[in-house]
Amino acid sequence: MSILTVATVPFAGQRPGTSGLRKKVTEFLQPGYLENFVEAIFNTLGDCRGKTLVVGGDGRYFNRTATGIIVRMAAAHGFARVLVGQNGILSTPAVSCVIRKHGAFGGLILSASHNPGGPDGDFGIKYNGDNGGPAPEKFTDAVYAATGTLAQYRISDAAAPALDAIGSTQFDGMQVEVIDSVADYAALMGELFDFPAIARLFASGFTMRYDGMHAVGGPYAHAIFESMLGAPAGTVINGTPLEDFGGHHPDPNPVSAAELIDIMFGADAPDFGAASDGDADRNMIVGRALAVTPSDSLAILAANATIAPGYRDGLRGIARSMPTSTAADRVARALGIPSYETPTGWKYFGNLLDAGMATLCGEESYGTGSNHIREKDGIWAILFWLNLLAATNKPVDTIVREHWARFGRNYYSRHDYEAVEVAPAEAMMAQLRERVATLAGTQLGSFTVALADDFAYTDPVDHALATGQGIRIVMTDGSRIVFRLSGTGTEGATVRLYLEQYEADPARHERDPQQALAPLAAIAEQLSQLQSRTGRSTPTVIT
Ligand code: G16
């Protein structure tokens, strides 16, 4: 067998976004498209000889083919060993876990996360480094630059190895180990959470519904919730990964996970509901007739973290992305620990976690995680809630309402305007950027602006500067309006409008969030003319 050097030409637009390169499957299917991007990553890494690479994905269409191509290219670049999930399947958190546990050089994750899959859907790829976390912007910028000048890529001419059976084989001078997709990850979860207490909870008749949305979370949920913790069969629904996610939009929010919401808001609802996304790094937590916002979930887990064995010694700090509600900041203040506000993108938490400055991290986009790995982690968040429910013996809604009574409620909502034209969306952001420079101190409706800017972040560890991370308008009472363009969409532009209003008075904690936030929404529209600029009278999705 020999190494082929294949002539190629650069593809325009291979710029990684918020989380790797995400494009339509049709774009990835162009000959050489995936190969070019992988070549750019390997070239940017430099000398790969003798190193270990982890490869796996969420099982979506093209996952298996792409895995084979990557293994062949890894052999051509001199990697000594590749660890591949069985059938090419590994959740994003599992890749992070496996990289760290096996001391790998890094890993390639094949996923477009919550974006739909199938031949007409999306595909994605991203590189995670030896800490198990998404490569920093410095690296992804270099990869993008490399994609612009590629003239060739290297690949083994051997047929891709079979990935069906667990075991180790030699492949063109490289060792290919097909590993159990769940085992390492499940073992780590067992160290962090009180599995016997959760098992007793299930044995007592506690009921749960987990919606795998036909994505990669299913096998993990079956193994952990049903086999290890004794939840009855049927606890996991839509638990078999399918290449097109069974037509689901595998995004665990009340709109896309409507089946679970119907169950949880219906008669005879189970005690607890949860879902995760395409690659199982996101989570949604639902009680009976109550969907917990991701921002509240982060704050509640932080406030109660010491109930879980893995966090018994307390937290070093809490980090959240800028658009995420400030509920967690209030908990950090009460605990006397620092809180950090980072740009959107899990990669920005990496340094804080590596430096031991933060223990828990979270984002409004249904992402929660901790220093156990370097990705957000859907199953982990669900287990944390199960541990909390087992430790307190209280229902989800009581835990949430008691939290609001203690810390106040941060009403929160995100309005998405998806697939709008790029030019008007960018013009709107440019106009807002100019406008915010003069907003501080002015009156908007019943609010006074305390601070308005285009968010910039200087990493406290490596001092890297990230600018242009979203327009934020912060009011004197802590209420906020935030505008951003999504970095994960694959069609046109997606405008995200984030609204947050703080309410200390428990007598006013049962309002409908959209009503509570209506005055802020009106101000946002007046400032941006978002609806007339995009030609949309309502958001595509409200969460
Ligand atoms: C990714 C990132 C998250 C980010 C989310 C939404 O999540 O890892 O940090 O919050 O996208 O990003 P945007 O608002 O730019 O679309 P995932 O689950 O899609 O990998």
Image (cartoon, rainbow, N blue to C red):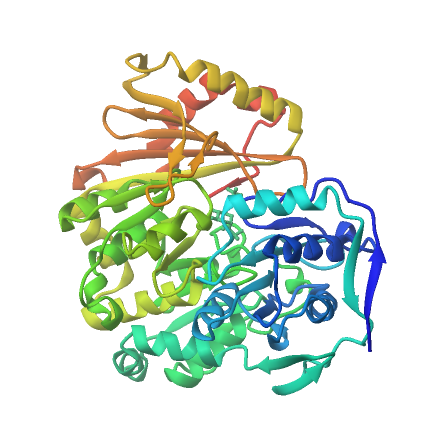
Residue 108 position in % (x across, y down)? 59, 62
Check the picture and name the quadrant holding the N terminus.
Answer: bottom right
**As drawn, 229 above or below 271:** below
Residue at coordinates 20% horizontally, 71% vertically from top-left?
391
Residue at coordinates 59% horizontally, 20% vertically from top-left?
427
Q: Is residue 512 visible?
A: no
In-image side of 57 versus 271 (left or right): right
Residue at coordinates 40% horizontally, 20% vertically from top-left?
523
Q: Nearer the viewer, residue 272 or 304?
A: 304
Residue 14 position in % (x across, y down)? 69, 44
In-image side of 110 versus 348 (left or right): right
Residue 317 position in % (x across, y down)? 24, 51
Residue at coordinates 22% horizontally, 55% vertically from top-left?
316
Q: Quadrant of residue 466?
A: top left
**As drawn, 418 above or below 173:** above
Q: Quadrant of residue 180?
A: bottom right
Q: Is residue 20 visible?
A: yes
Q: Nearer the viewer, residue 54 or 439?
A: 54
Q: How many marks?
A: 0
Q: Nearer the viewer, residue 32 or 110?
A: 32
